[in-house]
Amino acid sequence: MASNSTLNVPSFSFLLLLFLAATLLSGIIPTTSSKELPIREATVLDLQLAFKIAWDTNLKENIATKDKLNNTADSFALHGSVVPRDSGFAKRLRKSGAVILGKASLSEWCYSRTLNAPNGWNARVGQGKTDGSILCPSEVNSVVGIKPTVGLTCRAGVVPISPRQDTVGPIRRTLIDAAYVLEAVAGIDARDKETIEVSQYIPRGGYSQYLKIDGLRGKRLGLLGAAVEFFLGNDTFRKETFKKHLRTLV
Ligand SMILES: *[C@@H]1O[C@H](CO)[C@@H](O)[C@H](O)[C@H]1NC(C)=O
Ligand SMILES: *[C@@H]1O[C@H](CO)[C@@H](O)[C@H](O)[C@H]1NC(C)=O
């Protein structure tokens, strides 16, 4: 398993972000005594502003947080475990304004306990939604995952599998979101020595400066036709959807 930790953004948390944006921007904080919550649709500007104020996220359950959430890697062996501190990853997320809403389940011990269990299964909650890496769930959910170079993000406080391969990265709805999250979480952390050397490769001014609306203009894209056949096989719906997106790109 190349990467053992991911950050998930289910659509419900996106809706919550919309809701947060709408309420923050209308200046009304809902209270329990409100009979009706003041909800209006947020504009893109609202969302950008809300992103600056606070953003919501979901961590995978193998990433430690010192709060009321469980830290079990979805194994009963770690049930009730108390961690000494937030993981380096969670610490940076909170510092950048993230509100950690919950944790996503995973293949028990990131699928390192046995290869005979169904993908995404664990004894604690049963069948979950994702495998233990960044790229697979991103591909399956048609969202953006960034698998950082090992050491770009801190692994301290994340259940380890392989120090040479473990890496923690974002899964977000858009590339812009993913770039901002990467910017927030990349950097030196004394608890993960690998981050010291790798930090020299972090661009001054962060990653978001490279976001360009026409960034793909003039680029050549290669597509392995046989791989599309292999992975999508007889699934004509997915194949058609894939081709449609490809036409959008070119
Ligand atoms: C923590 O795990 C226990 C046992 O699986 C569960 O009952 C409880 O709801 C979990 N707590 C949170 C905050 O998810
Ligand atoms: C596609 O369908 C053919 C004919 O039914 C079948 O032999 C083949 O195994 C299927 N391929 C995949 C990837 O499901």
Image: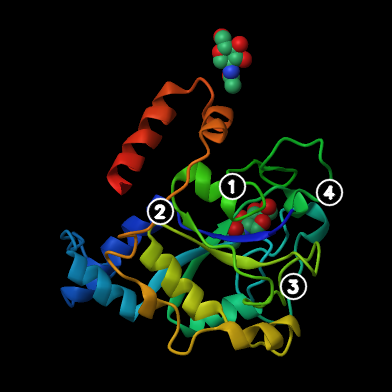
Tell me the distance, in whole angstroms, between the alpha carbons under discs 3 and 1: 30 Å
- Which badge, 4 or 3, comes first in the chain's sequence? 3
Residue located 76% across and 48% down the image: 111
Q: Are marks 4 and 3 in contact (CB under 8 Å)?
A: no
The answer as to whether callout 1 falls within 8 Å of ligand 2 is: no
Q: Which residue is mark 2?
A: 220
Residue flagged by tag 1: what amino acid is it? Cys
Vertical placement of residue 232 versus 34, above or below = above
Dot 3 falls on a residue whose secondary structure is loop
Q: Secondary structure at mark 2?
A: loop
Of residues 3 and 119, the one drawn nearer to the viewer in this rendering: 3
Q: Marks 2/1: CA distance? A: 24 Å
Q: In this rendering, which labeled residue sits more in front, label 4 or label 2?
A: 2
- How many angstroms separate mark 1 from mark 4 (CA)? 19 Å
Q: Which residue is located at x 72 percent, y 58 percent? A: 73
Front residue (pair 227, 38): 227
Residue identified by numbered label 3: 82
**In the displayed structure image, the side of residue 7 where residue 209 appears, left or right:** left
Which residue does the numbered mark 4 point to in the structure image?
Answer: 113
Q: Residue at x 57, y 59 (%)?
A: 103
- Contact between labelled residues 4 and 1, with CB atoms less than 8 Å apart: no
The first of marks 4 and 2 along the sequence is 4
Q: Position of residue 190 (x, y in %)?
A: 71, 90
Q: Residues within 10 Å of mark 4 (few under 14, many from 20)?
A: few
Q: Amino acid at mark 4?
A: Arg
